[in-house]
Image (cartoon, helix red, strand yellow):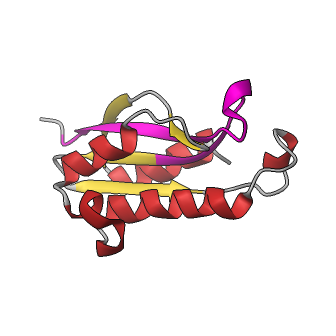
């Protein structure tokens, strides 16, 4: 019997100019229902991101990512989205939007340790 658990994740992308559709990965959100785990890990490379758009507002990007992290934590500062059930919060985070920070498609897998899996994905897809 395996103790592996299914999980879903989305890569968070910074799209400084939506019209150009160029992006840089800036975070990962991982949801594992069985482990009651929902967490976002975000990193903004302030040296690389302006290569996509010299006038990118790094503070706005960091603020948008902080809001996503707050929703994942279930933080009261995230308003109604942060107070919802964990699965609903993940649904909010993964919903397509046309803003400077956008989620990519949903992917899945199995893991024994959701936190370690999140760290692995951030290292592979963001750093």
Left or right, 55 with reference to 82: right
Q: Count all numbered tags in the image, as a single digit.
A: 0
Give how far across and how far down residue 66 sits, in percent: 51, 64
Relative to 29, does residue 104 appear above or below in the rendering? above
Residue at figure coordinates x 62%, y 62% from the top left: 62
Left or right, 45 with reference to 76: right
Tell which of 68 and 32 is nearer to you: 68
Give how far across and how far down residue 38 sits, in percent: 31, 54
Relative to 77, does residue 56 appear above or below in the rendering? above
Residue at figure coordinates x 64%, y 60% from the top left: 60
Tell which of 95 and 19 is nearer to you: 19
Tell which of 56 and 8 is nearer to you: 56
- The residue at the far left in this view is 1
Relative to 75, does residue 119 appear above or below in the rendering? above
Residue 8 magenta-drawn?
yes
Give how far across and how far down residue 98 sits, in percent: 53, 35
Q: Which residues are magenta?
A: 3-28
Residue at figure coordinates x 21%, y 64% from the top left: 83
Residue at figure coordinates x 34%, y 51% from the top left: 114
- Location of the N terminus by quadrant is top left
- The residue at the far bottom in this view is 76
Left or right, 124 with reference to 45: left
Residue 4 magenta-drawn?
yes
Tell which of 70 and 27 is nearer to you: 70
Give how far across and how far down residue 54 sits, in percent: 87, 47
């Amino acid at each position: 019997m395996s103790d592996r658990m299914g999980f879903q994740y989305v890569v968070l992308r910074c799209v400084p100019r939506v019209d150009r559709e160029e992006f840089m990965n800036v975070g990962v959100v991982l949801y594992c229902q069985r482990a009651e785990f929902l967490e976002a890990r975000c990193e903004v490379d302030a040296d690389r991101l302006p290569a996509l758009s010299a006038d990118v507002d790094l503070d706005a990007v960091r603020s948008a990512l902080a809001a996503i992290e707050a929703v994942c934590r279930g933080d009261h500062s995230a308003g109604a989205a942060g107070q919802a059930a964990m699965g609903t919060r993940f649904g909010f985070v993964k919903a397509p939007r046309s803003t400077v920070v956008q989620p990519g498609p949903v992917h899945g897998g199995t893991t024994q340790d959701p936190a370690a899996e999140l760290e692995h994905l951030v290292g592979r897809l963001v750093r």
